[in-house]
Image (cartoon, helix red, strand yellow):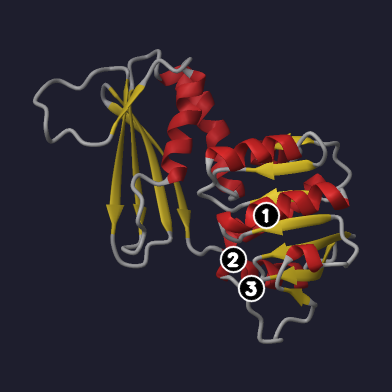
Amino acid sequence: MVRVIMHGCNGKMGQVISGLIANDNDVKLVAGVDAWDDGHNPYPVYKNIADCDVEADCVIDFSVAAAVDGLLEYCVEKKLSCVLCTTGLSEEQLAKVDAAAKNVAILRSANMSLGINLLMKLLQDAAGVLAEAGFDIEIVEKHHNLKLDAPSGTALALADSVNEKLDGAYTYVYDRSSRRQQRPLKEIGISAVRGGTIVGDHDVIFAGADEVLTFSHTAYSKAIFGKGAVQAAKFLAGKAAGMYNMSDVINVK
């Protein structure tokens, strides 16, 4: 049984994960941390993680960047592994994450979805064959109309996965409206669509002469990220100090 503290327990993802763990016999949510609480959770909630005195094995974090420094200090002090899902960390904070990983196991990933991380592996296999054969590579991502950033971090992670296989030889282009020229071969086009309540769609297109191969991933709810985080917490149980990501979780499947 993996005992988990949910850091950011009353946020949307915190509540999703609380529900998932409630139905998982291999994980137990023993405490939560959040700036506000109305007492509805079936576990104790602390306003600051430094005040949490509950025995645990791992922290799952879906909070805010400002809370991450205290979280890392707590995990190192208590020797707890951490699934770090909060985004928007500064370079200074990322350095602190690396330093903490020398003392405890930390898993950090651009996207917690098991499907997206499996897709990254499949894309590398495809890129190794199709890029050499002259296929053009394009990524189209779609999200809801409230999303502020474009392209999505996941789209960039997919592009990076492909480019890693291709020794970083490809450049990224986000808008072709200002140029009038033939498409360069070693280019990955990344397009963003924003509208409605789309949770997240990503298509990676390999377009060759007379044939097109498309890899697609569709997220129907944010629960997929919660499921990945819970799987990551299970994976970290008993792991040595170090930095891990979701590709490590996929590799043990």
Residue at 38% across / 62% down in the picture?
198
The residue where tag 3 is placed is 35
The amino acid beneath tag 2 is Met
Residue at 51% across / 20% down in the picture?
165
The residue where tag 2 is placed is 13
Q: Is residue 184 visible?
A: yes
Q: Which mark is residue 64?
A: none
How crowded pointer 2 is (Cα within 10 Å; few <14, some 14-19, many 20+) is rated as: many
The amino acid beneath tag 3 is Ala
| Residue 202 vertical position relative to residue 195 in the rendered view, above or below | above
| Residue 134 vertical position relative to residue 35 in the rendered view, above or below | above
User: Which of the image's four quarters has the C terminus?
Assistant: top right
The residue where tag 1 is placed is 229
C-alpha gap between disc 1 and disc 2: 10 Å
How crowded pointer 3 is (Cα within 10 Å; few <14, some 14-19, many 20+) is rated as: few
Q: Give the foreground label among 3 and 1.
A: 3
**Relative image position of residue 116 (x, y in whole percent):** 54, 44
Nearest to N terminus: mark 1 or mark 2: 2
